[in-house]
Image (cartoon, coloured by chain):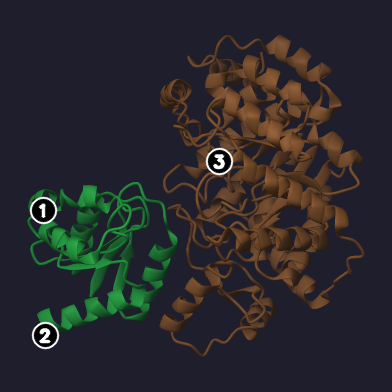
Chain colours: A brown, B green
Amino acid sequence: MSQLQEERDIILGNENVDSFDFDEVREFVRGADKNLFISHHFDKADKMLVQPRGGFPTYEKQFALYEFFVEANVDVLPLTIDSNTRLNDYATAKKMLRLSEANEVDMLNGYPLVNHGYRSTRKMMTHFNHPVSLRHGTPDARLLIEIAIASGIFEIEGGPITYLLPYSKNFPLDKAFLYWKYVERVCADYSTLNLPINRESFGPLTATLVPPSITIVIQLLEMLLSLEEGVKSFSVSFSQQGSMTQDIVTGKVTRALAEHYAKQINCEDAKIHLVYHQWMGAFPTNRDSADQLINMSTVIASMVGADKIITKTREEAVGIPTKEANAQTVANTQYTLRILSGLPAIVDEQEEAILTAEVHAIMEAVFNDPADTLWRKVFNSIKNGIIDVPFSPHIINHNKMITIRDSHKNIRIIERGNVPIPDHCFAYEKSCCDLNKDTTSIVNDIIHDIGIMQ
Amino acid sequence: MKVVTGVIGNDIHVVANRLMDLSLNARGYEVFNLGVNTYLEEFFDAAVETGADILLISSLNGEAEGWSREVKMLKAGYQSLDNLIMMIGGNLSVGSGNAEDIIPRYKNYGFDLVCHQVDLNTGLDMLDSYLQEHRPS
């Protein structure tokens, strides 16, 4: 028996799992309908795929949400997981699920997939016969993704960096790398049976003034960590940054460099997709303004040429959205995509050259770390601040990089910390900003720059 | 002046914490930032370790009051913290509360300076003038 299979036996021996039948699950994946695979839709679609967010505790409410989404002409269904499951606290999730079922009050902020199990969840997924994307935020997602794939969920979001640095203060980063290596291997293994399982990285990170160079580097590294384990379909992503030009440049550089670095490890056969998140920062409380912001995001995603867009709702500032508001965004976004045409091609060669040089320089510094494997190089690079994510709560993050917006709302680096931004790029970034201010004014600017959409 | 700062309890809101770090440094303080999700014991331990003059606790999710009730009891267990200046700021109640009710409660819990929904620089100005009054150098 392989070492991976031994580990899988232990993970699936969890007391909350009702007898996992490996052979039956393999047969299910082998014979699964192509429509359940997002990789199939990426291949055949001639439009951007639209995917909302959403998860409710009970089977019935999740089913009802999907009915609304399908009615609104959704392309990809989400399955958002509750916070207890994300922290591997299945006992609490179970208790809260029972309370939600008994009282018709939602006691969880998502669907407790492990407690529901794959036998019943698979009935829902095959009933709707749409591709489903697993949205969670789990540092140790080993059990969760096993149950997801067995349920017919063939897109797994997340990664060791993007699901840790924005969400956790103390979870050990080295452990997260090893837990995600398991996820990649299981996805790669199932990908040999039918169409590939798609992995997607979470580009928004903290959604707070993260410069595109940092976003892209982390996207590329999670992609490489996934491809080197045999994953054949991967989505890199980022969220709306505040400047249309910066978004277009970011999309173009991300695509070009993803292809470049995949080729460097001889994985050019893998399919790489680009995903765009509608504004992930603080939303306006006014619902009509929120609708306008969402619509603008859709236009920018089209300019970026994304393969998939992940939507927000007009109730974002208020709380967990109702299924009605959620489905309305899907319908509105589909409408905007249908009527948008004749978009101009915008190219900014100087911005592209600067951003490309920054990403190459950081990637080179990561590869030059003396560690023997890629994940250890990445781990060391985060530890010593070569990669520095603004506003990460994690203790390992360096917090020496400072970013602000220039007059066109582009995110610019004014303090680089240990991040090896080349001198000419750093000089350019600073030249875009007014730096003759004292720290108090800069702090006030940062507060303003975070809340630009409110 | 040495300041230990951080966000109390199971609160992961990091943005203001980073900005306070920047602002305190700019005002000439030596900052020991414990970050988000920090418990009272950790604050007091850090104050002892660093020999801090000031402990500046912040809270956004409104749950600070539950933790603050234990300040006096826990602090009494440390011998060297009697001169520590205690400050707290942020959203200091769950839901809407008004400063007239909240400030005396927190002073009773053992804080010298209490800032409920006061903007960052106003709060730090309050700290500066408090120091001038109480620590003539």
The residue that mark 2 highlights is B136
The residue that mark 3 highlights is A137
**Mark 2 and mark 1: Cα distance apart in space:** 26 Å
Label 2 crowd bin: few (<14), some (14–19), many (20+), radius 10 Å: few
Judge by depth and name the residue closer to the eye, A101 or B135: A101
Q: Quadrant of the C terminus of chain B?
A: bottom left
For the point 14% across and 63% down, which residue is it? B104
Label 3 resides on the chain identified as A
> Mark 1 or mark 2, which is nearer the start of the sequence?
1
Front of the two marks 3 and 2: 3
Label 1 crowd bin: few (<14), some (14–19), many (20+), radius 10 Å: few
Front of the two marks 2 and 1: 1
Label 3 crowd bin: few (<14), some (14–19), many (20+), radius 10 Å: many
Helix, strand or loop at mark 2: loop
Label 2 resides on the chain identified as B
**Mark 3 and mark 2: Cα distance apart in space:** 50 Å
Residue A11 appears in view = no
Label 1 resides on the chain identified as B
**Left or right of A423 in this view: B137:** left
Above/below status of A273 relative to B104: above
Q: Position of residue B7 (x, y in %)?
A: 33, 56
Residue A416 appears in view = yes
Identify which amino acid the numbered label 1 is placed on.
Answer: Lys
Please identify the quarter of the rendering in which residue A336 is found. Answer: bottom right
For the point 77% across and 67% down, which residue is it? A249
The residue that mark 1 highlights is B72
Identify which amino acid the numbered label 3 is placed on.
Answer: Gly
Q: Are marks 1 and 3 in contact (CB under 8 Å)?
A: no
Q: Position of residue A60 (x, y in %)?
A: 59, 24
Above/below status of A113 relative to B27: above
Helix, strand or loop at mark 1: helix
